[in-house]
Image (cartoon, rainbow, N blue to C red):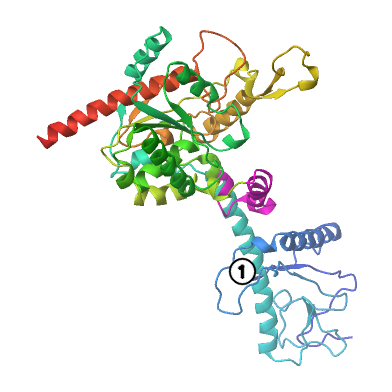
Amino acid sequence: MEEEPGNPRRSSEESTTPFLSLNDGLIPQLFTSVPSLNEAASYIAQSTSLFTRCFSDYSVEYPSSGDSVTHEQELTTFSSTQNGASLDSDHPSSSGSHSATDTPPIYAGVTINSSEGPSQNTSAIVQSNNSGQSGLSMFQGLIERARRTVRGSADDIGWLQRASDMPSVEDGTGRFMEILDNIRHGLHKLPNSIVFLLVPGLFSNHGPLYFVSTKTSFSKMGLACHIAKIHSEASVEKNAREIKEYIEEIYWGSQKRVMLLGHSKGGVDAAAALSLYWSDLKDKVVGLALAQSPYGGSPIASDILREGQLGDYVNIRRLMEIIICKVIKGDMQALEDLTYERRKEFLTKHQLPSELPVVSFHTEAGITPAVLATLSHVAHAELPLMAPLSAGESPKLPVVIPLGAAMAACAQLLQIRYGEKSDGLVTCRDAEVPGSTVVRPKCKLDHAWMVYSSLNGDPSDWDASQVCEALLTLLVEVGQRKRHEFAMKDE
């Protein structure tokens, strides 16, 4: 029988042919000559469609001339039945008509009849192209999330040092080492005319020994020393208000001015108190020392909370909210306030007063096998049932955890990922306060060492209370020098 014009003969062995929709149209059949490849193509198309649905909530939408592309649209597979026809682009004909016995082809569940006008056919293809654009948008969104995840905080670390409007720092490491050596030989110079206020950092409410050894050492020297009982997991501005009230209470009760030393987030909280309420505190505060404080921000906090990363797929932010808000009973804003975005926003509006003496101290954590085996004494447990009847107090069992190993692992991660030296949580560059006297010791000390003593008992190791004393002694000298400079300017 002769072929009808414009309707080429179809082979009876022709199998179902898949088509994948993309931005510019339809990919023609590629695998019809080899049935196994044809089946593989169909399987890949179906898998792609399923994969698209799994991540439809995170697809990136781009504006289009037609209807808006929704998250639920996906890559579409076009199939023709055994009696169906391929697109005319594959088998061109003179008239473009089909025989009366042909079954109308089905595209993405839409039956296109020959009797329908070109506008109906075009609308079905446009809908398929929109679905293809949605799939590509999802893939582009995935690539963008991967890029943001890999880039991380590389552009933010050390931003304070690059800011042109920030004052320069002064290196006080040499003088600090001299003071520390004198302290270790029994020469102490801290005046008793000052009250010392220690401000603890994040999660200090769950560490009963935080700053305890330093306060005990100061008390033995006859110095008035207090540990600020703030909710360390609260926001920076909330703690700043509480620290202001602490300072005023100490000043009115003792008629002595206050010198502050803040560790980690405690330094950020203390600096915020002086920045926000300096007009009320300038006659009551001698100076501020920040030890291992993320004054410029923390890459750990920023990498965890940054939006648009691969971590959004597993809701890392929600996990942190559960830990901080439900388990620790804190405020999520406490961690958010340590991100680079929040620190830039705060420091743009509230900088430390230029007349305030400031010392900043940062260290680099060691990553040797000996450090990995170090245990930190974070608390103690009382065992009353095991105490002898004649004993005056219950025996205490030290509670130790491998904080050194955790800090070493974080420090190595920051070194490999960003090429930055850190104490495990805070990079050295982010801990330097603009306009301050900076102490950069070469000794390897991690972030937790400052407040939790180790159990190695080596007398040659640095003692945290002695380091705090040396920092505050240096701060007294910086304050005397700064007051002299301001007096010279006034004359």
292 versus 88 height, above or below: above
Q: Give x and y (percent) for residue 146.
A: 59, 49
Q: Give x and y (percent) for residue 284.
A: 32, 37
Q: What secondary structure predominates along the stretch shown in magenta?
A: helix
Could you say which is closer to the camera, residue 73 or residue 337?
337
- Place residue 409 in its image quadrant: top right
Could you say which is closer to the camera, residue 395 or residue 118?
395
335 versus 52 height, above or below: above
Q: Secondary structure at mark 1?
A: loop
- Give left or right: position of 143 versus 358: right
- Give left or right: position of 331 versus 132: left
265 versus 116 height, above or below: above
**Residue type beneath disc 1:** Asn
Could you say which is closer to the camera, residue 342 or residue 276?
276
Q: Give x and y (percent) for residue 138.
A: 64, 61
Q: Is residue 186 magenta?
A: no
Disc 1: which residue:
23
Could you say which is closer to the camera, residue 38 or residue 422?
422
Q: Is the N terminus in the top left, top right, bottom left or bottom right quadrant?
A: bottom right
Residue at position x 41%, y 6% in the image: 185
Residue at position x 45%, y 20% in the image: 218
- Magenta region: which residues? 303-329
- Give left or right: position of 349 versus 38: left
Q: Is the C terminus in the top left, top right, bottom left or bottom right quadrant?
A: top left
- Place residue 59 in its image quadrant: bottom right
Q: Give x and y (percent) for residue 106.
A: 80, 79
Q: Is residue 314 magenta?
A: yes
